[in-house]
Amino acid sequence: MGTEPLDPAAAATAYAAPPPRGAAFDAWRDWENRDGAHGLVAAGILAANARNVQPWRFTVDDGAGRVDLYADLTRRQGALDPFDRELHVGLGCALENMVLAARARGLAPELTLLPDPGRPEHAATLRLTPGERVPSELYDAIPHRRTNRGPFRREPLPRALLDEIGALAADDPGAPALLWFADEERRARVAHLLVEATEAVVADEGQSLAGHRWYRGTDGAVERHRDGMTVDTQGMSRTMSSLGKRLPAPSRRTADRFWLRNTRSVHVATAAAFGMVTVADTDDPALRMRGGRLLQRVHLFATARGLAVGHLNMMTVRADRERELGLPPRFGKALDELVGDAGGRTLVTFRIGRPARLAGTSPRRPVATVLGADAG
């Protein structure tokens, strides 16, 4: 298997279906139609984020060449993210898209994380000055990237390709790192733990309720909210997705059973490898955002190669829940054992492989909706 990059059109064909009709998907089609700082926001809102909660708000000053990113605290996930781990990772993913967009459009971005100690929701400031245009395959992949919850082809990825992806991690002290679980024994160990963690999530009433809050079961709900998990993004075949949208929205327990069944029979069963982004301190918001930037680079690189990435955050979700409730650290300990001598702590876990099915497109709130710093 070669590791040559695909051109953007080939990547789109290999990886994702075109965005469906409807205003909830216009952001994917119109993202390059905005100039200046607003164009960076248009790129940022297409970033990966857990359960498509889109935990961001922005302020823009085109005259001063400045964009500020804020955590939208109204979009917290409660029991599924009690310490805002995933919120900050999602913000980091958005920042990576914004930095790539700035460079590709001839702007030199200067990024400051957590610029205001008195306002922890103020996540980052990007100051922009004229610079050289720096095109990249990662920038070109932005409108084609999707989180893929469908089956992958049952074929391994070359170690050289995994090493190439691993090189996306910055080589400096304290930087986020990538760990791979690609051989059969290590992959089976991670798969087993992910299924057990999923069972624990659906058995936890608070976490089950927190997850179902973000399910959009009808086209009307998708257009109304323009966020969350939809039928089309669950990795089903086109026929099953069409049927699912004609039926009444599933109950919370039915949705939980579907997720658990798919975790066991699709998500972990067909993964070519599992990856982990690790950082020195998973409680540090700045390191979380740096880890999110790395995760987004992995997504975009994979897209450019016709690969698929799917988030599998069940172990970290359970580890945080154990800590919140004062429970024995079953999954926290398991994560530490998986990392072992490699050092660091697990920030996020994902699967990667060659997709067997096109990924669905998630809805996105438009730029106009996410402008304004009143995010508390």
Image (cartoon, grey):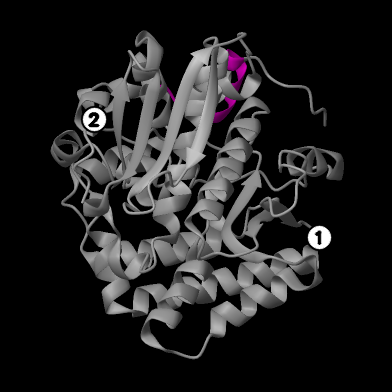
Left or right of 155 on screen, residue 28: left
Q: Which residue lies at the image location 79% right of the left edge and 65% below the top edge?
A: 342
**In this picture, is 73 found above or below 19?**
below
Q: Which residue is mark 1?
A: 183
**In this picture, is 229 found above or below 347?**
above
In this view, the residue in front, 101 or 155, is 101
Q: Which residue lies at the image location 43% right of the left edge and 56% below the top edge?
A: 86
Q: Secondary structure at mark 1?
A: loop
First of labels 2, 1 by sequence position: 1
Q: Which residue is mark 2?
A: 371
**Which portion, as a residue range, is magenta?**
8-18
Q: Nearer the viewer, mark 2 or mark 1?
A: 2
**In this picture, is 229 found above or below 264?**
above
State the predominant SS element of the stretch in magenta. helix
Task: Categorize mark 2 by other alpha carbons within 10 Å: few (<14), some (14-19), many (20+).
Answer: some
Quadrant assignment, res 317 = bottom left
Q: Which residue lies at the image location 24% right of the left edge and 33% below the top edge?
A: 370
Give coordinates of residue 78: x percent, y percent: 29, 66
Residue 10 highlighted magenta (yes or no)? yes
Amino acid bearing label 1 = Asp
Amino acid bearing label 2 = Leu
